Amino acid sequence: MTEWPRFNMAGGPVEVPDRTRRDLSKPVLYHYDPAFKELFGHTQELLKQVYRTEYDVIIMQGEAILGLEAAAAGLIAPGDKVLNLVSGVFGKWFQLFIDKFGGETIELAVPYNDAIDPEDVRKALHANPGVKYLSVVHSETPSGTHNPVKEIGAIAKEFGVITMVDTVSGLGAEVLSPEEWGMDIAIAGPQKCLSGTPGLSLISVSPAAWDAMEKHPNPVRGSFLSILDWKTAWLEGNRFPYTPSVSEMYALESTLTQNLEEGMEHVAWRHQTIAKAARAGAKALGFELWPVREEIAASCVTAVKVPDGFDEEKMRGLMRERYGVMISPGYGDLYGKLFRLGHMGVAAHPTYLAAQLAVLERSLHDMGQKVELGAGVGAAMAALDDWTSGGPT
Amino acid sequence: MTEWPRFNMAGGPVEVPDRTRRDLSKPVLYHYDPAFKELFGHTQELLKQVYRTEYDVIIMQGEAILGLEAAAAGLIAPGDKVLNLVSGVFGKWFQLFIDKFGGETIELAVPYNDAIDPEDVRKALHANPGVKYLSVVHSETPSGTHNPVKEIGAIAKEFGVITMVDTVSGLGAEVLSPEEWGMDIAIAGPQKCLSGTPGLSLISVSPAAWDAMEKHPNPVRGSFLSILDWKTAWLEGNRFPYTPSVSEMYALESTLTQNLEEGMEHVAWRHQTIAKAARAGAKALGFELWPVREEIAASCVTAVKVPDGFDEEKMRGLMRERYGVMISPGYGDLYGKLFRLGHMGVAAHPTYLAAQLAVLERSLHDMGQKVELGAGVGAAMAALDDWTSGGPT
Amino acid sequence: MTEWPRFNMAGGPVEVPDRTRRDLSKPVLYHYDPAFKELFGHTQELLKQVYRTEYDVIIMQGEAILGLEAAAAGLIAPGDKVLNLVSGVFGKWFQLFIDKFGGETIELAVPYNDAIDPEDVRKALHANPGVKYLSVVHSETPSGTHNPVKEIGAIAKEFGVITMVDTVSGLGAEVLSPEEWGMDIAIAGPQKCLSGTPGLSLISVSPAAWDAMEKHPNPVRGSFLSILDWKTAWLEGNRFPYTPSVSEMYALESTLTQNLEEGMEHVAWRHQTIAKAARAGAKALGFELWPVREEIAASCVTAVKVPDGFDEEKMRGLMRERYGVMISPGYGDLYGKLFRLGHMGVAAHPTYLAAQLAVLERSLHDMGQKVELGAGVGAAMAALDDWTSGGPT
Amino acid sequence: MTEWPRFNMAGGPVEVPDRTRRDLSKPVLYHYDPAFKELFGHTQELLKQVYRTEYDVIIMQGEAILGLEAAAAGLIAPGDKVLNLVSGVFGKWFQLFIDKFGGETIELAVPYNDAIDPEDVRKALHANPGVKYLSVVHSETPSGTHNPVKEIGAIAKEFGVITMVDTVSGLGAEVLSPEEWGMDIAIAGPQKCLSGTPGLSLISVSPAAWDAMEKHPNPVRGSFLSILDWKTAWLEGNRFPYTPSVSEMYALESTLTQNLEEGMEHVAWRHQTIAKAARAGAKALGFELWPVREEIAASCVTAVKVPDGFDEEKMRGLMRERYGVMISPGYGDLYGKLFRLGHMGVAAHPTYLAAQLAVLERSLHDMGQKVELGAGVGAAMAALDDWTSGGPT
């Protein structure tokens, strides 16, 4: 049997705190047990606090790709014009959903190491009257970049455009709010910056988005993909459209509670601070960052450019097999072009970062690369002048 | 906060053994960690053993309703004739999927307290040439009845009809095999007789079913609903179409292992034996069973007719609130007409049954019903002459 | 490998709630970690609340026999007169400690199915001037009886006698208080009525007892047996005399918290009520109770007399092996003379009692005994007219 | 509430693997349940394998200080001559036990940063005819040193002297065997190099030691301190002398299994290799090691000399409070003179070591010390040229 890693510092699912896993293991309740219904309702309220929203929130019972497809299915009708912002693999992927549901895609794309300029969004909306929806990925995990969603959202609102925001790895990395950021439908996952388990979609829905779903010529109902089913059944009827994943809900309640106990400001600051340190570490080892400039670097993972001729598979293999540290390669088209240091949730902490960089350095050394052992760790630690404690233990 | 129950003896999700919940709480791995991929593959092999099949099996990452919708979506094309066998709420519900995907339903229905007669299936297939699919619910949890799927499957095979079998609460209640029972696509859930956690669909797919999905005029691909995505990505490409629910997979591996350790024959025998005892207990208390005859009574739950004028809500409320035992009411159209004693998984054991019946009796007494305390328990225990140990602890 | 039981309804260690076991599994801290010291101190405060005392409490790091020996070792000097009250195996056993530490035993004994009469204590103290200590077992688990410690304590106080009270299975079965009950040194265990894990001694110490220990001609110090070490090191110095059992302390904090959340009155009432029902159940099956009269029957276990010629080993074997229910035989001299139904902690609940009695009945039937199945359960349930919910889940 | 640390890298109790803690949380069995007795017996066999012995092993139900006191109590009679080897706090402490039980101490001492020279033992035994016992601490955790027990044991055997060996933190740090090392009574703890939970004493007893205990003029019996009770009750009678700590036994079974799965050679090699790297790291930061020469440095912790005027309390406080890493100070007389890097069990791994050193460096920097961030980590990693995977995950 393959030995398990010491540390999971991948691009998600990430390590889950012990406390959350203990809560995950609570006795399994019948979903209509009053104690479970209470827990579900309470968790929904916690999610509102994490999202800082008064909008309805929906917890769909499948990982975030379900929420993304459900949003597209629920909103996009044949012929609807969708401005799709593409700065990475996930942005591009969203077009498949637009196509599937008959939308007409207007693409605004940048290279996968860059971020969308809000002014280009304004121009695109000017140039394309009749755009109904705008889709954007807040945090492009595969590229290690993030887009200025707050600014983009404001522009969309000027044009009366409904936004669909993939903030799967964005929630927790920045303090955000659907209302303030102009996010009509936002989809997040527990298994990224929140340090939870995979298996759920965390969705916030604005009144405009509900309205659009209900006025859809062929509303999605009676389906695992239906967000409206959750509105009718659960929000309005206190029934479940189908059996929820009971244990995952225990974990989510725990996850949200812990993030709120820490405070979303600290959670976000912690991710940003460790990301900055990770970049310092990578650069000190002579690597180039994948993002064209640091301001657009994500806080969930640090994408590092693979130097010409460098065997990054071998490096990751050594890190994982010899030293027990799992990190992520590039995803999809980016495979082989970059690798990613992970620092989400529990791992957004100096200890994890130091362990990760030390093992990276040591693996480079094992490969015969010229590396000053300790240089990356030292640079990262030097970037932590204002570190304060807090976060999942 | 609402007090939690002592025992969950509902219609599912059911109680999950301590061992499974400990396994559920293992550290969360990145889904592309070699240890996780190995575990996923191993779990798939275990599922084949539980299903006693050489067919491909697919583990979809959402509760069984996802598998059912996915099967319908993947197979049924507009105009396809589907013989839908209806003996309960779930059988009737399936028509919604047939409708959604453009199928033409031919319904063969019996009252919701009865089971399908295989000969009626033969007649229906004779009378309706061109039927492409047959859909049937093996174990109608809401009615506490089961259909003779083995006989029905044999007839379908005579006619070259592809079968879609909802065996969500059937797997584990009988020793079955897709090949021997003529099940082209079978969907089960871990959270019923297997005593696992909800959140996954356990699907077996025959070559004929794969063929039909691939020849569908508009194959479902690039969707959370796609079974084909799992074939292409995972079975053929060793990649995941999306992020699996890592923790649920730990629980599933544990659940399947425990069922195989016990032996599927013993698992099935245990459910059948306790169900027989539960019926004896209910009858001894003067209740009538909901199914028209005992041979069609399910082994997952025992559906009991609500006597005229009897306040079954109050009874269940007392059982749950005063004595900590959660049982299920009727579901959908059957609400108020029956209640259900639960005996799946862990609860398919004399101790659980005795506790449940004792609390039922005591609650009846509290309501002012005339009841001989101990009569139900005694009759149930009397039905256990050949009891042998074994099963989840 | 031997199959594990479904239910542990023995004389202790008893079943431990899921919540406690989750807490037990928290990450192990260094004992001088500030978080652990805080937890230790907090747990001590909780213990004071459970004991309803302002006296010092000491948590020794070994099961209650350690606390009992430590009390004897710390108090009894050669030549000290000890009035030892004997109503069972544990009472008699204590004399070994008196002997070991050089005390002079004055025994006041009753048969092992009876309880001490406080007036006999008064007489004994009159008849034996110069008695320094009185030792008594509050709840004689082996006999299923309890002694009137409150009355005995009051008399001891009249005579200025220092009391040593074994309330290992008494704490939780009655609402008690060292001050009000005249208990100078009381020793309890978490693994009985409190439903915790074995491995710790819960001790309360009056000023008089401290004084006696300190004035002992040869005070016990520098030993695992020393209570004074804990006073000096921990209470006065905030250091540990040796490494505490970190995980057991997590479990204890959880155990005490849960008992306080339920309320000690309800905990005690629950034990007493279920014990009464257990006696009704046993009698309805034609058994005689072991205690000479019900008023002295303990609330922790129900001791049942073994009828002449009855193979109680076989009965317990069937209960455990075939039906997964573990109960206790007689202990020491009482082996073969009685068996004990267990109803402590989690098991002090109608569901557990019903399961236990149903399995008892069924096992009798399997042995060829004439038994009306359900009679015991029914009688027990009939005794629960005023049952209210609450207690560990 | 005090925030918990991320990593416990103290001198023990140490971090316990997730797997062990899951096993710890299994349902609590009655100690006379056949499944528990089987587990206890099995665990004893595992302990023999870990100890590599055919001697009897005894698992006492209290942390190792209990085993040490029990050994002294069981063996030493008034007037017995004991050669006590003292190279640190724990060696010195043992004299208290010799005194308590009336032995006559002959001390062979070296400074607390040095180790015993076997030739001095030979000289002492020559010079002191009639020595009956030799006591020695294998691994002096407070000093971070170890003694050459194998050589010392061989000399003792030449003189017919019975040895008492404190190998609490030695078992696992070296591959040892009581027979080959001449250890008559050896006492280890699970909570050190084996990475288990505190609360048990792991004792191996040679026939000569049994003989001495039985021939003791006043054998210890009927006491929590009695090793003979365990022989009579458990080894010979299959009964327990008192209630064992059930959950701790689950943890121990798991701990021993995991160490054997890894292989004791690898366990020992892992500790030695990481200890070497830790020393390299500390030296690279300009610290001096506490032991006078590296050959005597222990593998459980690395003791580092506190430079003159350096505020080591402040440093540890920063490490713990700001960065979540708990390490140990000096103990007893050594407080303030040294601090200790911990690397036992789980923490004997490059990741943990890197995290620890990085946080140490950063804390020094925070204190205004001149430190090249990364230097210690780099030097430690450089010392891991032959690292191989394996060990607890």
Image (cartoon, coloured by chain):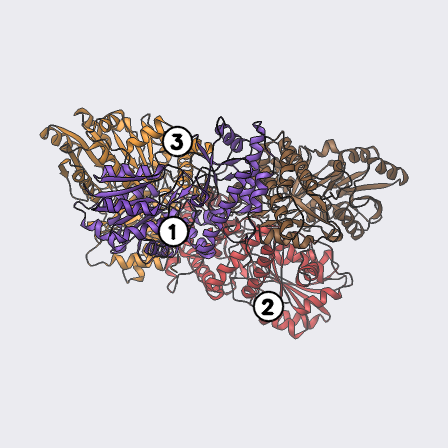
Chain colours: A brown, B red, C orange, D purple
Cβ atoms at labels 3 and 2 below 8 Å apart: no
Across and down, in percent, residue B13 comes to: 54, 51
- For discs 3 and 1, the disc positioned in front in the rendered view: 3
Identify the residue under disc 2. B178
Mark 3: amino acid: Leu
Check disc 3 and report its element: helix, strand or loop: helix
Q: Quick one: label 3 or label 1, which is nearer the N terminus? A: 1
Across and down, in percent, residue A304 comes to: 71, 45
Front one among D141 and A352: D141
Question: Which quadrant would the C terminus of chain C be assigned to in this image?
Answer: top left
Left or right of C66, for residue A167: right
Of all chains, the one bearing label 1 is C
Q: Are marks 1 and 2 on the same chain?
A: no
The reply to whether residue C250 is visible in this rendering is yes
Mark 2: amino acid: Pro
Residue C7 circle label: 1
Image vertical order of residue C380 relative to residue C123, above or below? below
Identify the residue under disc 3. C46
